[in-house]
């Protein structure tokens, strides 16, 4: 048994001529995080999920017909509504609400019986043009459906059915929400923001001239109209920099363009700074009296969440300051890939056979 927390596979092969079982193998770089998966909502029509246990109903004219669902940890969050203004047909049996395809109710996390309103996971409000009905939604894990109960769910509950607020009603309004535990889902997994699944692109352009003395000077992208494709709202308009929203590898490209100078021949340059420290630069020679541009490119650089990126311009004309052209400069940043992110509870195992086997 190997008790050391860290060791190399080569040392393992050379020291142990046997089959080795390695637990918690880490492949980096990685970010280990704990939390609940939270997703954006998806949508479909509510009528596509409402069924009759004997015969399905048909629906009249609908001015609202929506069903939304998303994941929050171990639960499916659902909400929906329907407004029917002309009568449909009732169908036969009780009305049930199906779940979206591929999802299975976790009966272990709901009350064992859903009869009589037990196993409640949500609430519902229905109006038939004359009366409001309040009820509860229950989860039936065996049928993998949601049921609806009205009235006193403990003493005299009534199922929502073809004889109890049916779809043959001329006016029918439905509003509901529920939180349903789903089999195989856990609340202790990768946090959504750190999972690295967002598209991150930020392009900013220069729209005003800027005077550059004989020193490296940060470009002030001062105009709001110069911000383009900032998909995560990460550009800081006050400090003129990109604040990194997620760790990962990024491509960074910038350009500065100098107007003609009345001074002497000069060197000009563009610098990429990360956390106020230069990581890449390009220098070139510009002739007196000519406009000149220079680009700097860092095709793949690892940035941590919370870092910031800036573009600097440089010139060494000691006789005069130089002005940047109004519309020729830019800074473009795009995320290329994310570090490996694993659940804090994940266990990786490998079996390795040494030379003696």
Image (cartoon, rainbow, N blue to C red):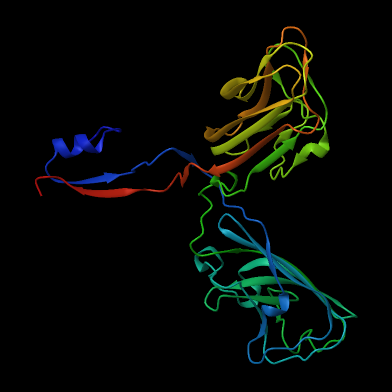
Most foreground residue, 204 or 129: 204
Q: Quadrant of residue 67?
A: bottom right
Q: Is residue 191 above or below residue 75?
A: above
Q: How many marks?
A: 0
The foreground one among 98 and 157 is: 98
Residue found at x 68% / y 32%: 242
Q: Residue furthest left?
A: 356
From the viewer's perspective, is residue 174 above or below residue 342? below
Please give left or right for residue 278 compared with residue 21 in the image: right
Q: Residue at x 11, y 42 (%)?
A: 17
Tell me the quarter of the image containing the N terminus: top left
As rendered, which of 143 and 256 lies closer to the eye?
A: 256
Instruction: Name the residue located 15 percent from the left edge and 45 percent from the top edge.
Output: 354
Relative horizontal placement of residue 195, taking residue 84 as reference (left or right)? left
Q: Left or right: where does residue 341 sit relative to residue 172? A: left
The location of residue 202, given as percent across then percent down, is 68, 40
Return the residue found at the far right.
130
Regarding residue 86, the answer to whether it shows in the image is yes
- Asked if one can make out residue 157 in the rendered structure from this viewpoint, the answer is no
On the image, the x and y values in percent for residue 176 come to 75, 68
Residue at 64 percent of width and 68 percent of height: 120
Query: Residue 125 location, x and y as percent?
Result: 79, 71
The single residue placed furthest to the top in the displayed view is 319
Q: Position of residue 48 (x, y in %)?
A: 68, 79
């Amino acid at each position: 048994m190997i008790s050391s927390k860290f060791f190399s596979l080569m040392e393992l092969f050379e020291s142990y001529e046997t089959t080795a079982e390695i637990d918690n193998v880490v492949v980096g770089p990685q970010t280990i995080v704990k939390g609940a998966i939270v997703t954006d909502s998806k949508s479909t029509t509510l009528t596509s999920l409402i069924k009759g246990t004997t015969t399905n109903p048909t629906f009249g004219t609908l001015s609202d017909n929506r069903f939304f669902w998303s994941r929050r940890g171990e639960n499916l969050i659902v909400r929906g509504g329907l407004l029917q203004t002309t009568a449909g047909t009732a169908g036969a049996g009780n009305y049930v609400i199906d779940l979206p395809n591929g999802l299975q109710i976790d009966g272990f996390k709901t009350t064992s019986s859903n009869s009589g309103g037990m196993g409640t996971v949500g609430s519902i409000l229905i109006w038939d043009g004359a009366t409001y009905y309040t009820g509860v939604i229950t989860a039936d894990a065996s049928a993998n459906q949601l049921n609806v109960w009205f009235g006193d769910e403990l003493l005299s509950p009534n199922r929502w059915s073809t004889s109890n607020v049916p779809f043959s009603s001329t006016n029918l309004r439905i509003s509901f929400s529920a939180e349903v535990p789903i089999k195989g889902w856990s609340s202790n997994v990768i946090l959504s923001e750190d999972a690295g699944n967002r598209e991150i692109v930020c392009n900013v352009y220069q729209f005003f001239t800027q005077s550059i003395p004989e020193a490296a000077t940060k470009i002030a992208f001062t105009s709001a109209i110069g911000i383009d494709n900032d998909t995560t709202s990460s550009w800081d308009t006050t400090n003129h920099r990109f604040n990194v929203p997620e760790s990962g590898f990024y491509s960074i490209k910038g350009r500065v363009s100098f107007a003609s100078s009345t001074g002497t021949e000069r060197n000009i340059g563009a610098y990429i700074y990360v956390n106020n420290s230069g990581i890449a630069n390009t220098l070139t020679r510009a002739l007196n009296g000519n406009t000149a541009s220079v680009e700097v490119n860092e095709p793949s650089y690892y940035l941590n969440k919370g870092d910031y990126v800036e573009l600097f311009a440089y010139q060494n004309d000691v006789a005069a300051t130089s002005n940047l052209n109004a519309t020729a400069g830019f800074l473009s940043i795009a995320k290329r890939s994310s570090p490996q992110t694993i659940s804090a509870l994940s266990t990786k195992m490998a079996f390795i056979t040494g030379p003696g086997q």
